[in-house]
Image (tube, helix red, strand yellow):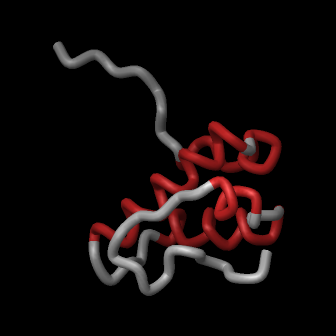
Amino acid sequence: MQNSNPLEGDSALKITPECLQSFDEPGIAVLAKRLEDDDYPTPFAGLNDWHLLRALAIHRPELTRPYLHLVDQEPFDED
């Protein structure tokens, strides 16, 4: 992957098929590390990374298997 974060510097989330295809194993590892460290300048920056990882988990599951715990798609009971 050429850029470790294709959304870097953008306030709007732009997840395109090209963006998803640009990721490789090292790129996913960088994204996952940022999410695990949870050290973002704004809550929205972290949310953008989470949405990106979630999209990757849907469209490129072979790359995200080691990081599915970060997607947090577990069902919960609201009662």
Q: Percent position (x, y) of residue 18?
A: 69, 61
Up-down: is 66 above or below 39? above
Residue 70, given in percent of the width and then of the height, sits at: 54, 49
Q: Position of residue 29 (x, y in %)?
A: 72, 66
35 on left or right of 39: right
Compared across the picture, whether 57 is left or right of 71 comes to right
The residue that appears at 82% across and 62% down in the rendered structure is: 25
Would you identify the image quadrant in which residue 34 lies? Answer: bottom right
**What's the residue at 65%, 54% (across, down)?**
17
Residue at the spot 72% in from the left edge and 48% down from the top edge:
64
Q: Across the whole image, how many numbered discs are drawn on residues?
A: 0
Q: In this view, does 70 lie above or below 46?
A: above
Assign the N terminus to one quadrant of the image.
bottom right
Q: Residue at x 33, y 76 (%)?
A: 11
On the rendered image, what quadrant is the C terminus found in? top left
Determine which quarter of the picture holds residue 16: bottom right
Q: Which residue lies furthest to the left in this view?
A: 79
In this view, the residue in front, 20 or 76, is 20
Vertical placement of 18 versus 5: above or below? above
